[in-house]
Image (spheres, grey):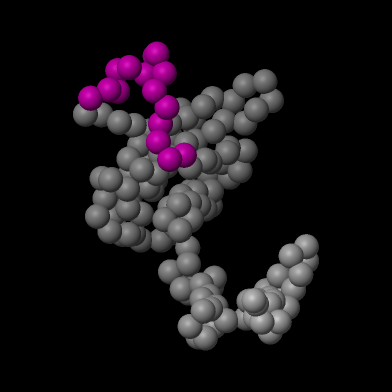
């Protein structure tokens, strides 16, 4: 025969009601929070940091070339392989590309994040390569040489204007 006090409910909440949020983990230490607050650079993802490098490069060029305000700049993970792009198979993968303006759509400059990251070791080297890729693509959009777009094209210094 069962004792009446052995039928004690395990939870003060009935099965149909939602459970209250837990204030502590099972060890009584509190719930785990984020590793770093959002304003700390550690909280920025690699994609966000890369997009910031592209944006910095674009801002440097827009001071000299105001018409770049009409150009869209995009960051994609990797380039897509299409039938006409079979030539870049093997060892050469594009680091960037352009899409010409048409039908009211602005010209677009695309920088591919993963190929650039693979070819660089540190932030400074990555920033220099991103800038060179952006300069090359802007030169293609404007129909001029990269050296005309930025006289320091090809220099691996990170000097600001």
Residue 91, x across and y down, in percent: 21, 29
The quarter in which the N terminus is drawn is bottom right
Q: Residue at x 30, y 18 (%)?
A: 87
Q: Residue at x 30, y 31 (%)?
A: 93
The quarter in which the C terminus is drawn is bottom left
- Find the magenta span and give its range: 76-90
**Residue 140 visible in rendering:** no
Q: Is residue 84 magenta?
A: yes
Farthest top residue?
Answer: 83
Residue 103's place in the image compared with 125, above or below, is above
Residue 63, x across and y down, in percent: 53, 52
**Residue 72 visible in rendering:** yes
Q: Residue at x 32, y 40 (%)?
A: 115
Farthest front residue?
Answer: 1
Residue in front for this viewpoint, 4 or 21: 4
Residue 106's place in the image compared with 53, above or below, is above
Residue in front for this viewpoint, 18 or 82: 18
Q: Quadrant of residue 124?
A: bottom left
């Amino acid at each position: 025969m069962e004792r009446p006090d052995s039928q004690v409910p395990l939870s003060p909440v009935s099965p149909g009601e939602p459970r209250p949020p837990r204030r502590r983990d099972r060890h009584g230490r509190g719930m785990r929070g984020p590793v770093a607050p959002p304003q700390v650079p550690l909280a920025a993802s690699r994609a966000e940091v890369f997009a910031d490098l592209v944006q910095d490069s674009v801002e440097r060029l827009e001071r000299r070339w105001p018409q770049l305000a009409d150009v869209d700049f995009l960051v994609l993970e990797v380039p897509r392989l299409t039938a006409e792009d079979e030539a870049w198979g093997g060892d050469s993968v594009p680091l960037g590309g352009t899409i010409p303006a048409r039908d009211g759509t602005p010209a677009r400059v695309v920088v591919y994040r993963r190929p650039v990251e693979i070819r660089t070791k540190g932030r400074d080297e990555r920033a220099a390569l991103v800038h060179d890729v952006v300069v090359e693509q802007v030169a293609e959009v404007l129909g001029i040489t990269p050296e005309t777009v930025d006289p320091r094209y090809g220099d691996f210094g990170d000097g600001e204007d």
